[in-house]
Image (cartoon, grey):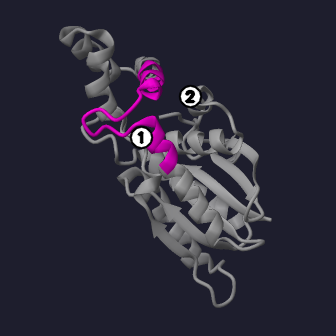
Amino acid sequence: MATILLLRHAQASFGTDNYDKLSVAGHRQARVAAEHLVTHLEPISAVYCGTLQRQRETAAPLLEALQAHNVAPPGLIPAFVQDARLDEIDHERQFSMLIRRMTGSESDALALIRDTRRSSRDYQKVLKRVFLYWQELPEEIDGLESWTAFSRRIESMLTDIVGRSSRGQNAVVVTSGGVIAGIVQQVLKMPASGCYSLYEPLRNGALTRLLHDGKRISVSSYNDSSYLEVVGQSEGEESLLTYR
């Protein structure tokens, strides 16, 4: 069997002008994730990453750690592949376009969007409403990626990763919560309506393990952030667990 480890990006900068960059805590999580992977995972054959800043900044310490620890199999340097198919759903664009359609009121839409920038809890509530509404749209609206198009792109990415893997190899995929939830929903053959329930509880830096033989794929573990808890407790840090 081969292993694919889906790593959700570390904490981004919610509530700032540039959400896409990692926060101070996010950089710490990314370093801890890198150390954990190179220490406890068998040799890594490939690292895949989306093109978003928060994804690339999460992958960077892992690439540095792989070099420093020289954990690649003899004569093999882990491949590093950036691919936009691993980019997150464009929630900002969804909010700006779909909330107006959902509320039917420009003023209500603006107030709702403003509230989401103040509170992570409020953001999550609105995200759920928008996500489920978006899934029901029959097609793209003004170039906004549809649920169907999103599902196809992540399916094609997973197919490519599986096709490039050989028996016993380990690939790490640095991506975002929506992509991870969508991939697992597909692997488990859940209906589309089940995707959000997988998405909501995902923690920053959490690991989801897939096993495959080149054809069949199974989910071995999901949303595992225990290594962050252990490091945080052992080093006296308040908490390394975050959700956004």
Main SS type for the magenta part?
helix
State the separation of the CA atoms marked 2 and 1: 12 Å
Q: Quadrant of residue 146?
A: top left
The dot on residue 185 is none
The quarter of the image holding the N terminus is bottom right
Give yes or no for residue 150 being in the magenta stretch: yes
Name the residue at 42% across, 50% down.
87
Q: Measured from the top left, where is residue 178 in percent x and y?
A: 51, 39
Name the residue at 59% across, 55% down.
33
Q: Is residue 1 above or below residue 94?
A: below
Asked if residue 240 can be seen in this view, the reply is no
Instruction: Please name the amino acid that badge 2 sits on.
Output: Tyr
Give the mark nearer the N terminus: 2 vs 1.
Answer: 1
Name the residue at 64% across, 30% down.
191
Would residue 24 appear left or right of 62 to someone viewing this image?
Answer: left
Residue beneath label 1, please? 89
Q: Measured from the top left, where is residue 88 in percent x and y?
A: 43, 44
Would residue 118 appear left or right of 230 to someone viewing this image?
Answer: left
Considering depth in this image, is 89 or 23 the residue closer to the camera? 89
Q: Quadrant of residue 2?
A: bottom right
In the image, the segment drawn in magenta is: 127-152
Q: Measured from the top left, where is residue 231 in percent x and y?
A: 66, 48
Give yes or no for residue 3 being in the magenta stretch: no
Residue beneath label 2, please? 196
Q: Residue furthest bottom?
A: 75
Would residue 193 appear left or right of 189 to someone viewing this image?
Answer: left
Q: Is residue 163 above or below residue 185?
A: below
Q: Residue furthest left?
A: 107
Q: Measured from the top left, where is residue 44 in percent x and y?
A: 65, 71
Asked if residue 141 can be seen in this view, the reply is yes
Secondary structure under tag 2 reads: helix
Considering depth in this image, is 134 or 127 the residue closer to the camera? 134
